[in-house]
Image (cartoon, rainbow, N blue to C red):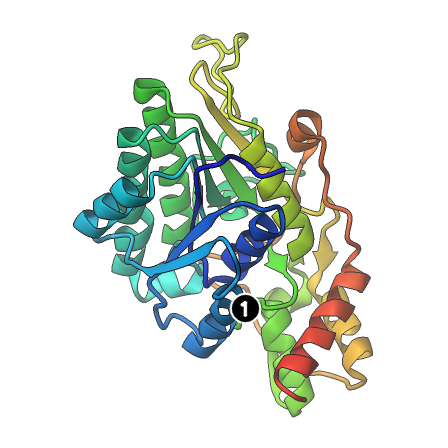
Amino acid sequence: MPLQSSPVLVTGVAGFIGYHVAQRLLDRGCQVVGIDNINDYYSVALKQARLALLEGQDGFEFQRVDLADRESMAALFGRVRPGKVIHLAAQAGVRYSLINPHAYADANLTGFLNILEGCRHHAVQHLVYASSSSVYGANTEMPFSVHHNVDHPVSLYAASKKANELMAHSYSHIFRLPTTGLRFFTVYGPWGRPDMAMFLFTKAILEGEPIQVFNEGRMRRDFTYIDDITEGVVRVADHVAQPDPDWSGGRPDPGASSAPYRIYNIGNNQPVELMHLIELIERCVGRKAKKVMLPMQLGDVPATYADISDLARDVGFSPSTPIELGVERFVRWYRDHYKV
């Protein structure tokens, strides 16, 4: 069943998650208006290839718009009048935030404010937006829970995502705008981002180039396959955030609110050590990696591990794709797409 008769606005539609979510919505019979600024943070050709798969499908419209352009965003909302907004556009990357911090203020703060204003002024039924597992920052209690305090980010990217959650809460509280933030945990799969480990390692091993292995390979990540992420996003969009009647200002729970506001983790709930990931890629590629062992980089965290019990309880969904199957599918896509 379609989400509603009015269009769904998907931001970052030429991006990895945005492309897959838009395709899933189109498959359900939804009208989708996708926006993206097609920036050059990574391969524009890859973004255009994703977009080419969407364009021409019934029910899909694309607009090239920059989130930080207030007038253009206001005009877009006024014309489209979306029923729901799935906001996946952002300046991504922990390491890039060390060298180009202003890009994060423009896209992740100003851009998100323009999204909130559009939703407020056009009575959007539900805003679902991408947060990140990086908000857990210096936390060491595992698995990470939405009920934990997340006031110690260790990168500007993480701080911008935490800021999005706070901004969303203020609009949920003042304007009763239903908002749901999704903390994604290391998303991978076909059409994935070239700056992520899965892509970088596969490319380098196939080309016989060395790979950089940070923290001596002891990093652990809750790798989450794209199909699971997509299913979770669409189910959450259907499940409009509601106030929690049991929420108390005397014992404030960070994962809920007296406003129509929710936060969920979407992770595979099974952390994988980096060295094991490399072994799986080697097995699928049929070639050994040349490893350059390095210390942990600034802004990185040693491990991520998602508690997904709230997501499972509220929307009846838990990611289930095993890493072995996901890596195999990614390597197959990579070989096919790049004719390797």
Q: Position of residue 64 (x, y in %)?
A: 32, 62
Instruction: Please name whichever residue, 223 or 189, is drawn nearer the observer in this view of the structure.
Output: 189
User: Quick check: 208 above or below 42?
Assistant: below
Q: Secondary structure at mark 1?
A: helix
Residue at the (78%, 72%) spot, across then down:
279
Instruction: Please name whichever residue, 117 or 131, is drawn nearer the observer in this view of the structure.
Output: 117
Q: Which residue position is annotated with label 1? A: 53
Q: Quadrant of the C terminus?
A: bottom right
User: Quick check: 42 above or below 322?
Assistant: below
Residue at the (68%, 49%) spot, across then down:
228
Left/right placement of residue 76 relative to residue 326 reads left
Which residue appears farthest toward the left when viewing the image?
A: 71
Crowd class of label 1 (few under 14; some 14 to 19; many from 20; radius 10 Å): few
User: Quick check: 77 above or below 199?
Assistant: above
Left/right placement of residue 38 relative to residue 66 reads right
Left/right placement of residue 297 relative to residue 321 reads left
Residue at the (78%, 70%) spot, across then down:
328
Q: Mark yes or no: residue 158 visible.
A: yes
